[in-house]
Amino acid sequence: MATEKLYDIWATRNPQWEKRYEDSIIKNFCDYGRGATNLREDRGKIFGGGYEIFIVAFFIGLYFNQKRKLNEDNQKRKSFGQPIQYWGNLDSVKGRRAYPKLREFIFTALIARTDIDFIALEKGEITPRKAVDMLMQTMEEYANFGFHFMEDKLIDDPNYFFRETAFLEIFLAFDATTPQSINEEEPESLD
């Protein structure tokens, strides 16, 4: 079945992100770029691998339903060097349990939010690789919006995400189903 192949191909990929978020977001919140001997310095980090904050950024973009194109200059992009298939597959030193199902949830969301012509895929008019390229673009653009959102929050308040419930509050606000609930803006009355 094409979907199984798509998942397998997608899982071997390594999404890109803009280097400009490396210091402000990724290294700020993750153990990213540190060897095991430097873990003592990282005890205050919220996340382990850099891909964990990428996942958070992806879900922020997904729930806002906002994408932001990546910089077209490949020199200004980077990847974590770890394919998606390995994201969250081990229990961590910080006491986190493995979360392999999350990869399936991400993939399902990408299938729902990416305009792939599955009939053309089934007929061989587009290749599975092309379909996965489309999924990756959607994933990277949602995450890029999420990184931009986080960076804006940090510019407004450098300590915004250093409260215990900061990320939880962002995701709970999605319950209201409108991005305005996060920005605390009221829509104009239609009356």
Image (cartoon, helix red, strand yellow):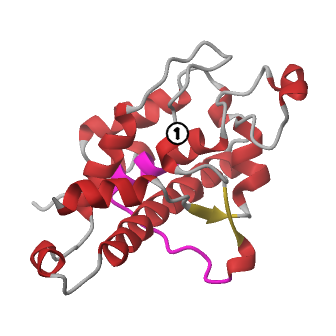
| Residue range highlighted in magenta | 57-73
Q: Is residue 179 visible?
A: no
- Residue 126 rendering spot, x and y as whole percentages: 25, 83
Amino acid on which disc 1 is placed:
Trp
Q: Residue at x 82, y 26 (%)?
A: 42
Residue that mark 1 sits on: 87
Of residues 123 and 175, the one nearer the viewer is: 123
Of residues 120 and 42, the one nearer the viewer is: 120
Of residues 172 and 13, the one nearer the viewer is: 13
- Residue 2 rendering spot, x and y as whole percentages: 19, 63
Q: Residue at x 74, y 63 (%)?
A: 20
Of residues 149 and 49, the one nearer the viewer is: 49
Q: Is residue 48 above or below residue 143?
A: above
From the viewer's perspective, tell me whether residue 16 is left or right of residue 121: right
Helix, strand or loop for disc 1: loop
- Where's the N terminus, which quadrant? bottom left
Q: Is residue 112 magenta?
A: no
- Residue 55 rendering spot, x and y as whole percentages: 49, 44
Q: Is residue 59 magenta?
A: yes
- Residue 88 rendering spot, x and y as whole percentages: 51, 32
Location of residue 29 (image quadrant): top right
Q: Residue at x 50, y 75 (%)?
A: 69
From the viewer's perspective, tell me whether residue 49 is left or right of residue 75: left
Q: Residue furthest top?
A: 95
From the viewer's perspective, tell me whether residue 186 is left or right of residue 49: left
From the viewer's perspective, tell me whether residue 27 is left or right of residue 104: right
Mark 1 burial class by Cα count in 10 Å: few <14, some 14-19, many 20+:
some
- Where's the C terminus, which quadrant? bottom left
Q: Residue at x 36, y 68 (%)?
A: 132
Q: Is residue 118 above or below residue 53?
A: below
